[in-house]
Image: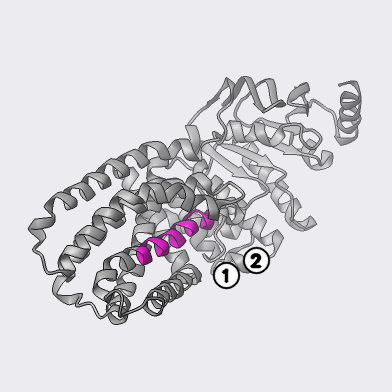
Amino acid sequence: MLRAERLRHAFGRIRALDDISFTLAAGETLTIFGPNGAGKTTLLRVLAGLVRPQAGRVHLDGGRRAVGWIGHAAHLYGHLSVRENVLFWASLYDVPGRERPARVAAVLDRLGLGGRADQPVRTLSRGLLQRAAIARALVHDPSVLLLDEPFTGLDLAAAAEFRALLHELAAAGRVMVLATHNVEEGAELATHVAFQRTGRFVALAPRGERGAPEIAHAYRQAMADA
Amino acid sequence: MRDVLVHAWLVLRKDLVLEWRARTAFLSTLVFTVLVLMVFNFGRDPTAIGPRDLAPSVLWVTFTFAAMLALNRAFQLELENQALDGLLLTPMSRGSLYLGKFGANLAFVTVVEAVALPLFALFFNVPVLPVLAPLALVTALATIGFVAVGTLFSAMVIRTRFAELLLPVLLLPFMIPPLVWAVMTTAKLFAGRPLSEMDGWLRLLAAYDIVFVALATLLFPVTVSE
C-alpha cells in the first residue's frame, strides 16, 4: 500500500507539489499526466524518499527496500558489465547471496539481455541501456514501482514487451505510479488517472471504462480549465 | 552494524573495480605527482637550500595535491547515469555510502603515495628506507584525516558547477593542521630523531582522524540530501 498525505514542496517560489494526496492498494496503478514542469518527477522523488517534502507524509509498506525506480537515468556504471551492475544493485538491496546469480540471470533473460549480460554498459545503445535500467529496478522484486517516462528510448517491440511485463507485475499485486506525457501508454496501464499542473492534481479519479481518447480529451479540458 | 559494513564494502569494491578498469584517474594522478616532484627538483637553487631541508615540505605538498585530484574524482564516478540517485534509493544507510567512499579514496591515495615515495627518494636523495616504518605511520595518520574531510567535501560540491575549484577552496583550510604536524614529524624523522620525540604530534594526528572521521560520517547524510 502507498499513501501520500497532503504533500507540499517548493523550489524557491516555484511550487512543485501543492497539497497532493492519494492512496493506492495492491495491484493499482496511478498514471500522472502533466506538462513539463508540472511536478511529476518531484512527486516521484518524494515518494521514493529522494526528496524530503516540506509538508505532508508518505506511507509506504516496506520502506525504501520495497521501491523500484525506473526513470530517465539508468543508474548504471559504464565500466561494469550488465550482469555486474545488476548484481551490485541486487546486493545493495540485500538479495540473498545464494539467490543473486539466478535472480539476475532470470531478470536479464526476461528483458532480452541474457546474451548481453557480459557486455560493458558503456557499449549499450540507448534502448538496451533502458532495458538494463529496468532489470536493475526489478531485480529485488519491489512491491512499489515508480516509473518516470519509463518508455523513453525503447523501440516499439521493447515498449510492448515492457508494457506486458508491467501488466504482469500489476496483476501480481504491485503498486505502480507512472508519470508520462504519452496518453496511449499511460492510459493502458492505469487503474487511476491524475492530471497535474503547477504542482497540483487538477483531477484525480479511477480510470473506469475510459480509453485513451477519452482520457486525452479530459486532459486537454483539465489543462484548459486550470 | 553488519549491514553498514557490508554495504560500505560493496561500494568500496565497486569504486576500486571501476578505477582499475578505467585507470584514467590513477594514471593522471601519477603523472601529476611525477611532474610536481620534477618541478620542485629542478626549480630550486641547490646551493641556496639543501634537498633534505626542503624534502619534508615537498613530500607533503606532493601528497596533498595528488590527494586533491583523487578526491575530485570520488563522486564524479557517481555522476555517470546519475548513479548517485540510484545509491540513495537503496536501503543502504548514508553512513555506509560515506564509509565505502572514504575507504576507496583512502586506498586510492595510499597507492599513489606508495608510488610517489620512491620517486621522491630518487629525486631528493633522501634515505627513506631507514625511516620507512615510522614514515608510513605518519603518512597513514595524516592521510586518514584529510581523506575523511575530503570525501565529505567531495560529496558536498559534486552537484555544483565549479566542483573542481570548490573542493580545494573548502578542503585546504582543513588540511593545514594535519599537514603542519605531518611536515614537522617528517622533518624530525629525516633528521634521524627517534619516534618518541614526535609523540605529541602523532597523538594530535590520531585525534584529528578520530574527530573528523566521526564528524564526516555524521554530517554526510546532510550533504547528499535534497
| B77 falls in the magenta region | yes
Would you say A15 lies left or right of B89 here?
Answer: right
Amino acid bearing label 2: Leu
Residue A2 is situated, as x and y percent measured from the top left of the image, at 58, 26
- Locate the N terminus of chain B and report the quarter of the image it occupies: top left
Q: Quadrant of residue A157?
A: bottom right
Residue B46 is situated, as x and y percent measured from the top left of the image, at 32, 80
Tell me, yes or no, if residue A104 can be seen here.
Answer: no
Q: What subunit carries mark 2?
A: A
| A206 falls in the magenta region | no
Amino acid bearing label 1: Gln
Q: What subunit carries mark 1?
A: A
Residue hosting label 1: A119
At mark 2, the secondary structure is: loop
Q: Which range is magenta?
A: B61-78
- A217 vs B97, nearest the viewer: B97
In the image, residue A45 sits, relative to residue B132, either above or below, namely above
Residue hosting label 2: A124
Let me know if marks 1 and 2 both belong to one chain: yes
Q: Residues within 10 Å of mark 2 (few under 14, many from 20)?
A: some
The secondary structure making up most of the magenta span is: helix
